[in-house]
Each structure stands twice: as structure tokens, then as C-alpha cells.
Image: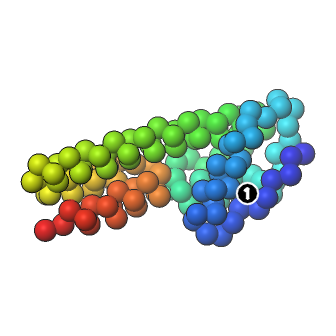
Amino acid sequence: MRSIPALPSDTDGQIRWFHDLTATMPWKSDEVLGSEFRTSFTSFVAAHLPAHALPKGMSDRELADAIQSLAENEISWNRALQAALIAADDHFQEQQPKLARESLIDFAATCPWKFFAQIALDQATNYSP
């Protein structure tokens, strides 16, 4: 069984925990993911992807695939956030602060990753009148 540290209590530590976890993938197909790990991962998903289905009742292989899929999804949303921030700044430079703000608020409304959505909302305040 793989030794995986417990999920930290702070947001930054939890994100680092997820990144450390995904950095060690792919795992062996016969890897056994214990109940403590499953509880930590379920807590991570509940905290950071509130609208996402919780990973319950999955085999070890299914859970490993779900983790890999979430890692790829996080990378895509990270890139989308970067693009949204650049587009908002472009709108602001074009003297359209309302559009800049609204574009980040719209991004946050569609982003499943809570921390990326919060970054967009925080940045949107920079474009408030």
C-alpha cells in the first residue's frame, strides 16, 4: 500500500498535496489505495470541486484514473484562468473596465475549481469602478 501523507488543513497545503499526489502518477495497476487516502481525497474533492461527484465506490484503478483525469482538468482550468486574466487586462487597457470585471465574474461562475474561481473574483475587484 502506498504511503500518502494526510490531507493538510489549509488550502495551499491541500493544493500542494494534490500536486504532489499527481506528480507520482501513473501508479502500478495493482496499487492499493487505503481508506485513509480515500477519505483524504474525497475531502479534497468536496473542498475544491464542490459541484463534482465524490469518488465513492470506485476500485483502485478507477480512483487512480479519476485522479489523473482531475489533474488534467486542473491544468486546463489553470490555462483558462490565465487566458481570462490576460483578456480582462486587455479589456481594461482598452478602457473597458466593466467588461474586464464581468469577464472574470463570468469565468468564476463557470469554473468548477473553487480556488481558480476565487482568484478570478479577487482579480475582478481590481476592475471595479
**4 with respect to 46 (left or right):** right
Q: In this view, which residue lies farthest toward the right?
A: 1
Q: Is residue 37 visible?
A: yes
Q: Nearer the viewer, residue 113 or 24?
A: 24
Q: Quadrant of the C terminus?
A: bottom left
User: Which x, y percent locates residue 117?
Assistant: 40, 56
**122 with respect to 6 (left or right):** left
In this rendering, the answer to whether 71 lies above or below 106 is above
Q: Amino acid at mark 1?
A: Thr
**12 with respect to 78 (left or right):** right
Q: Determine the image quadrant of residue 101.
A: bottom left
**90 with respect to 75 (left or right):** left
Q: Nearer the viewer, residue 38 or 67?
A: 67
Q: Is residue 51 visible?
A: no
- Secondary structure, mark 1, is helix
Q: Nearer the viewer, residue 25 or 49?
A: 25
Residue for badge 1 = 39
The residue lying at 75 percent from left, 41 percent from top is 24
Q: Quadrant of the N terminus?
A: top right
The residue lying at 60 percent from left, 56 percent from top is 15
User: Which x, y percent locates residue 111?
Assistant: 40, 48
* Mark 1 neighbour class, 10 Å CA radius: few under 14, some 14 to 19, many 20 or more: some
Q: In this view, which residue lies farthest toward the top?
A: 29
User: Which x, y percent locates residue 103?
Assistant: 23, 50
Q: Determine the image quadrant of residue 10.
A: bottom right
Q: In this view, which residue lies farthest toward the left?
A: 95
In this rendering, the answer to whether 43 lies above or below 61 is below
The residue lying at 42 percent from left, 40 percent from top is 79
